[in-house]
Structures are given as C-alpha cells and as structure tokens.
Image (tube, rainbow, N blue to C red):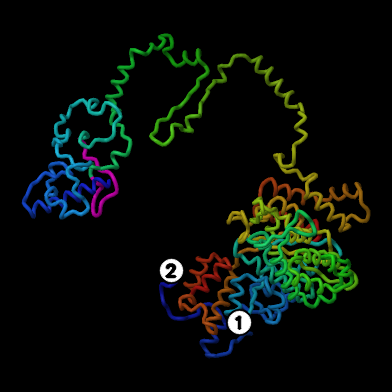
Amino acid sequence: AVLRRTSQVRPLHGSGCGQQQEAIGMETRPETFSIFRTQENDPACQSEQHLGQYYTVPPSHFHTVFPHGLPPRYQQQVKTFNEGCVMVRQPALELISHLKRADYSKPTLRYLLYGVKGSGKTMSLCHTVHYCSTQGWLVLHIPDAHLWVKNCKELLPSSYHASRFDQPIQASNWLRNFRTTNEHFLSKIKLRQRYVWTKRESTEEGRPLGELVDMGVSRVKSSSDVVGAVLKELRLQAGGTEGGFRLAVAVDGVNGLWGRTTLKKEDKSPVAPEELTLVHNLRKMINNDWCGGAVIATLSQTGSLYAPSSAYLPQELLGEEGFDSMDPFVPVPVSLYSEKEFESCYLYYLDHIHFHHWLQHPHSQTEEGKKELIFLSNRNPSVLERLCAFL
Amino acid sequence: MAAHTLKKSIWSLGRIHCHIYGVNVRNPLNRATYATALSTNHSSQNKGFPDRGNKGPFNRRSRREAGDPRTDRMPVDQDWTTVYPTATPFRQGSVPLPVRMGFPVKKGVPPEKKGNLELIKIPNFLHLTPLAIKKHCEALKPFCTEWPSALDTGAKCDEHFPVKVECKDYVSAGTSLRNPSARIVHLRVSLSACVNYDYAMYLLTVLYHESWKMEAWESEKTVADMEEYSWEDSPSQKNIMSTLVRMQVAGEGEGEAVREELLGRPEVQEYRDSVTRLKNEGESESSMHQYRDAVKKVLNL
C-alpha cells in the first residue's frame, strides 16, 4: 500500500539535517544540527530535555555491557547501522531517577516494566542497565527467564538438593556472559564461605569470585550450583560498608519464573518451576530481603508459556503466586511512541537514507508516507521498525 | 458414482461404435436403450472389460426393458400418500419435481435429479406431507381418550393442575439417537397458587436459623475458596509489613504496637485499598496506576 505513488523527494518537515543536505550538498553528517540526536551519551546526565532523542552507546561498552541482553532485531539494526543508538524515553528516565534517589540501606526495591508487545520494555531495561554499568554497579542481567523454563535439552538431578533439577548448559552460558560483563569485579569480591563441590574439589573462603565463576564455566555439571553460590555471595555482600558495591538484578521476562514449564521429568510428569535450581535461586534474588541494590524486571508475553497473546498487565502474566512474591513493587508502564518520539524515530530512520541507504522508497519521505507509517504501525516501536526495514 | 461414470463412458463408447459399425446390438453390460457393439468387438477393442462369456454381474442377457418413469403418468390431483407411504430413499422416477442438487458442473448448474446420488443420500420427508399426517391422526383417533369436558378454559386447568412439566423431544437424522437439548425439562409452578402462608413463614425461619449453623467442614475453607479477596492475613500484607519494619519507618522495635501503628497509617490504608481493588476488580490501567501511586507513597519514593 505504501508503494503506490512515486513523488519527488522533498522533505517537508523541519528536518534541519535534510534541508541542509539539499542546500549545501555536504557529505559529512552535521550531527550538531540533528534534533533527534543528543550528544549526552552518559545515561546519568540525561534528563527530560533529552526526551525523544537518540543517544549513542559507545562501541566499547557494547560487548561488555550487553553480551546477551539486547533484543535480536535491535542487534541486527546495530550491525546494519554500525552504531547503537537508544532513544531516551520516559520509563527509563523514571527508573534512573528512582535509582539515583533510592536509599540503599533499606530493603531492595523492585521495579516492573510492563506494556503491550513491542512497546520498548527490553530496550528501556537495557538503557537502565547501561546506566547502572556506567555508575559502576555490578549487573546481573538475565536476558530471558523463559529460556530457563523451556527447551532445555539436559536436565540433571541436582546433587545439592534431591528433588531439584540442574540445567548445565543454560547455567554455564549465563556464567560466561556474566563473566564478560563484570570482569573488574571478579577479582575484587572475595567469598565469605567455603563451597565443597566434590570430595576432592572445593573453593575456600577468601578466594576471589572469579575463581568460582571460572570453575562453573569449565565444570559444566556443577554450573547450576555455582550460579546459586554466586547469587548468594552477591546478595550477602551487596551494599556492604567496606568495599561495597551496588547490585542491579535485571530480569527480562520475569513472569517465566512463576507459572508452568514445558520440561518433563523422566516419568513424563511436568516439572514445576521451583524444582529447577536456577529458578529457585533467582527467585531468592527477587525477594526484598537483601539491601544495597535494585531489581529491575520486565514482563514479556513473547516467549511466555500458556499465556494468551493479548495479556500484558502484571497480574495476568505474573499470576497470583508471582504477584504475591513481587509485591510491593513499583510498576512502570511503557507506552507506545508519543508524537514527538515517533517523529524522532522517523527522522532517525530517514537520516540513514543519506548515508546508509535505508528507507529507500521516495514516498516514505513525504508527509503522506509519514501518515501511512503512523497508521500502519499505530506508533508501536517494533512494528515501525519492521515496516521501515522492509521499505 | 463410479458405477454411473462407468456406465456413461461405456455408453459413449458404445455410441461411437454404433456409428462406426452401424450395428445396433443390445449391450450386455447396460440397458437396452444404450446400444453398443460391445458383444462382438468386445475382446479386441476393450481391454478393460474381458469377455466373460455372458457370466458375471455385468452380463445379463435377459433383462426387461425399463419403462417410462412414473412421473409421466402422474395426474395432478393424485394421492401422494400412495406414492410415498413410508420413509423411502428418493426415487427420481417417482418425484415429479425438477429438483437439482450438488456442486455446479463447469459453466453450469447443479446436476439434475437423474442418477443424482446426492439426492439419494440425504433424508427426505416426502412421506410426511400434511395430508399424510392428517391420515395418521385419523388412524390414531380410535385409540385416544376424550379431553375432559370440565377443563374447557385455561384458568380451570391452572387451578386443578398448578404444576406443569414440559419435556421436549427432538427428531433429527444423524449419527446418534440422543440430543442433549432433550434433557432439559421445565417445571412451572405459579407462586400465587401456593396458598399456605404459615408454612412459608415457618420455612423461612428454619432457613434463617440453619444458615447460622457452622458445620465442621466449613472451618476447612481455604483462601482459594473465598469469594472475595481480603487483605488481612494475605501475603501482600505480610510483605508490606516486613518491608516497612525493616525500613524502620516506625522507629526501632518490633511487636504488636509497631504493627498496629503501621497499619493505621494512611499510606498503608491506601496501599491496602489498591491491592484489594486489583485483586477483586481485576486489572486495568487505572487500577494499576492507583497501585503505583500507593506503592510509591508507602515506600517513600
């Protein structure tokens, strides 16, 4: 429907960038004149005046902060555009302001991002994680809790607790990514307890955390228990007065921790989530019986099991058990793009036509084309992205 | 259907042969109206139909000719009940209507009734015309008793027979005898017809006192059985209490006094209302917003 007319390429809206291009025919990108970009790349310094503008994540941060956390389509976009730009939006700013002002000697606060599919919950979470990372927090990012309750090829009975099950592959993958994100903490944090793995192997008190993590990555069989130990140590030590650090627990798809799994035991009976070591330990992290950090979670219907596709409100996706565990939490709604945000996103994609040949179709640059995009996408961020990628 | 097409193809083949050889020989496979030369040229032309020497189901030499269909000889004012006295499958030669049924052939219309298996498959009610039913009723009359002459008005029937029971039976052609709608029976009683006021009051008093009695098993009522969500003693209350105590909002110390004090605070009341609203009314944007504001106030954000 969008490919009906071919009209002259005339940017009608006030895109300073575009008009400058037409007039002067410059090759370089006049970044300072873009109204949809901001130079403020530090999340700590962003405020309401930057709302709707894109900031660039420095490339050096990409691999360390987000080894596994970004949505797949966004990762592709980063590869195409050769830069990672995130829009500054209200939910993330709100979260960051809460994190700035919170009192870390009190019990942990839980924040829950909720919204319809494709509204930008995971991106807001990643924005907040970037903030935490730049502020020197230790980030525990679980990219999708649903991955731990479905499609697990190997389920070993736990050695630590008779009725529980281990997931070695998932645990060791996660440990590897955790190690990449938090390299600098691994040598600083010392264990407060002795952990015995087998008759001959144990990790002594006072050893650095890095040793524990390395052991978990190499000895895959006990990796789930290593994850449990790591979480416990971090919980005990976060917010401590000497050498204390702040701990951010970022869980995407937290509704996967309560509810049902698709895993089955050998006698074909279903496995409940609490029978999985990883889930059991993660649930302990989400409780607010520790202090010195924050829990930021998002709900996700995509990838969730046995949830209707129209469900997006917290109680629907979390269920009674989940709600009671998370209660009291601060729900943060993530809405679709506002007028200004849509404008900004549109200009951002348009910008790439000059340098990266995206949004190729000439019709998409006219006012008519823009109205069509608004109508087709209903200002839903992910739908807009798919439409523009298609053009 | 297969037999029909087989017949047709042989017929057309036969016609061709007829034209070619100019011989009008009776076709051993079909009725005499379809003339073919198959009996003589059979083994050499048609490999698919081996000559069995006048034996087998397709070979019947002595077959009487079919006459005209009965429809040609039907007068307009005939007695239809004699044509279809009972339930029988559709016979195209007996039904004088130009009925068509089936998926339309290319560029056309549904196929005609001649040789139409679709019409034969479906149930028909040709044996149940109004006249036939009238005849049935007349035949059944000797076996019926008369309606009581005293019950000539509706009011009198209601007076003597206040309880009315209505059952429905369903007839359909299908795989099963049973129709679940037939299990519904309506029993009607008019309340104004019940005359005993004293008895009614007695019943109500008994019910009232019975409802106050607690059975032993009622104490086993669990949270899941409750009709409404009550915040007291719920996980939500426990969570917020423990959080607030740990936050030392009310000052040092634990115990009943602190709990009471906390429960009395307006933020906690607001929080309680919002959680109750969420659980009882279900979720919506507005109830979520209310919960959000309440949590922010309670946790001092």
Quarter of the rendering containing residue A175: bottom right
Does the magenta segment cover residue A355? Answer: no
Asked if the residue under mark 1 is in contact with the one under mark 2, i.e. CB atoms within 8 Å, the reply is no
Badge 1 element: loop
Circle number at residue B213: none
| Residue A103 visible in image | no
Query: Badge 2: few (under 14), some or many (20 or more) residues near its Cα, within 10 Å?
Result: few
Quick one: which residue is furthest to the top in this view?
B150
Stretch in magenta: B96-111
Quarter of the rendering containing residue B96: top left
- Front residue of this view, candidates A280 and A266: A266
Q: Majority secondary structure of the magenta segment?
A: loop
Q: What residue type is labelled 2?
A: Ala
- Front residue of this view, candidates A354 and B46: B46
B282 left or right of A358 in image: right
B189 left or right of B69 in image: right
The quarter of the image holding the C terminus of chain B is: bottom right
First in sequence: mark 2 vs mark 1? 2
Give coordinates of residue A46: x percent, y percent: 72, 75
What residue is shown with label 2? A1
- Front residue of this view, candidates A174 and B110: A174
Q: The residue marked by circle 2 belongs to what chain?
A: A
Instruction: Give the vertical position of A348 relative to A22 (above or below).
Output: above
The residue lying at 33 percent from left, 17 percent from top is: B140
Instruction: Give the vertical position of A260 relative to A12 (above or below).
Output: above
Quarter of the rendering containing residue A199: bottom right
Quick one: which residue is furthest to the front in this view?
B53
Q: The residue marked by circle 1 belongs to what chain?
A: A
What residue is shown with label 1? A82
| Residue A368 visible in image | yes
Q: Which amino acid does label 1 sit on?
A: Asn
